[in-house]
Image (cartoon, rainbow, N blue to C red):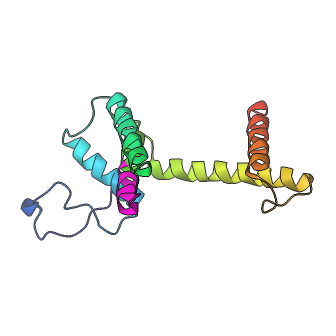
Amino acid sequence: MKMSNNHQSKNINISLLDDIANDLPALARANCIQQQVAAHGFDWPSWHGCFEKIQEEVLEVKQELMAETIDQKKVAEELGDLLFAVVNLVRNQGIDPEKTLHQANAKFERRFRGVEAILTGQGLMTADATLEQMDIAWEEVKSDEKKSV
């Protein structure tokens, strides 16, 4: 956790969060915030609470998306809450969220490159393929990955 030099004396902390650097990337800062408050007892006793919070946030996102008039500011706020809740579950499991997201990105990229290869083999470019054709190719790539494990 990267700490800032916001205080001249360590005895002047107003908040547990004051020493968390503001210039951290959002994912790292969310993790640091959660580690800091968890270290002082503000944490779910098990992963179940984290998971239930994620489900609650998903419902709130859905409500905003289903509103008669969609307010992008509210949607963004709820999506931010959802991301924060997901980081909390990742942290709760002792997993590094940055590394985990890097791995998820790499997995998606690998699979999408497989989709592109399948489409190319069919004489198609992604720009010319339908979503259904791309989804079928995606499922084929996933299936092939499971067979090779």
| Side (left or right) of 140 relative to 48 | right
What percent of the width, then of the height, locates residue 73?
36, 62
- Residue at the location (85% across, 50% down)? 118
Name the residue nearer the viewer: 119 or 17.
Answer: 119
Residue 11 covered by magenta stretch: no
Name the residue nearer the viewer: 33 or 4.
Answer: 33
Residue 72 covered by magenta stretch: yes
**Which residue is at the far front?**
68
**Which residue is at the far left?**
11
What percent of the width, then of the height, locates residue 91?
38, 42
Q: Is residue 130 above or below residue 59?
A: below
- Residue at the location (35% across, 38% down)? 56
- Residue at the location (43% across, 45% down)? 62
What percent of the width, then of the height, locates residue 69?
40, 57
Quadrant placement of the N terminus: bottom left
Q: Which range is magenta? A: 69-81
Quadrant placement of the C terminus: top right
Name the residue nearer the viewer: 89 or 52.
Answer: 52
* Dominant secondary structure, magenta: helix
The picture quadrant where one finds residue 77 is: bottom left
What percent of the width, then of the height, locates residue 80?
38, 54
Q: Is residue 134 above or below residue 25?
A: above
- Residue at the location (73% across, 51% down)? 131
